[in-house]
Amino acid sequence: MATYVLIHGSEHCSWYWHLVAPQLEACGHDVVVVDLPCDDDSAGLKEYADTVVEGVGDRRELILVAHSFGAFTAPLVCERLQVSLMVLVAAMVPRPGESADEWWENTGHRFPEPFDPATVFAHDLPEQLAAELPSHLRRQSDTPFRDPWPLDAWPDVSTRFLLCRQDRFFPAEFQRRVVQERLGLVADEMESGHLAALSSPDELDRLLEDFRTSMTP
């Protein structure tokens, strides 16, 4: 079986995956869920990748799943560990030398106006989870957003991109264009808002397993 490595996005923590991880474990997989040092102003992208690598240890048959800003970290891990598959979910796709601060303008992203986090991120969450979500959010340091993405090219690792059709932060039309331009891929799609691991964990688990089993031996 595989080892799923789950990488959260900006401001989040390992709790983001708490509905997804048990289902993957029930299928017989090993699951590594990391807490990135997002509230540490001394930590940049290198330290984020270090955190994932240390969490993985000597595990093999790795499938990296990166949400949102986590996609700035996952490819760096691919340069250091043997990864079978990388899945980006509602993610930012960096280019060589580009910082996350630059990504917004370079991709033509437009923030929703007015910007209400509850409306943008939690609109399709069950009521209880929407109420619980703020207590699990952390302060996000600007440090990793200023770091230029250090790779010269996208890693030579099988990559799938899963966009969320009800995403109000990264709208589907925007994501389809960016994924095609930057990865040369046609994105896979699911019915969910930006926080798919909370709003649609069953569907996300099913798709992750579909991606795993469809890999060419």
Image (cartoon, rainbow, N blue to C red):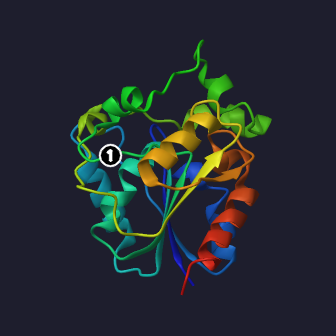
Q: Confirm whether residue 35 shows in the render.
A: no
Residue to which mark 1 is pinned = 95
Would residue 24 be seen by someone viewing this image from the given angle?
A: yes
| Residue sitting at x 72%, y 44% | 192
Q: Is residue 37 above or below residue 101?
A: below
> Which residue in the rendered view is the most extreme toward the bottom?
217
In the image, farthest residue toward the top: 114
Residue nearest the viewer, comparing 111 with 123? 111
Q: Position of residue 202 (x, y in %)?
A: 75, 59
Q: Choose top left, top right, bottom left or bottom right for residue 41.
A: top left
Disc 1 is placed on an element classified as loop
84 shown above or below 92? below
| Horizontal and vertical percent position of residue 135 | 57, 34
In percent of the image, x 60 and y 74: which residue is there? 212
The residue at 38%/71% (across/down) is: 56
User: Where in the figure is residue 105, as x and y percent of width and height?
Assistant: 38, 26
Q: Considering the image in quadrants, where does the C terminus appear?
A: bottom right
Give the residue type that dot 1 points to. Answer: Arg
Q: Residues within 10 Å of mark 1 (few under 14, many from 20)?
A: many
Foreground residue, 71 or 11?
Answer: 71
Residue shown at 55% from the left, 82% from the top: 216
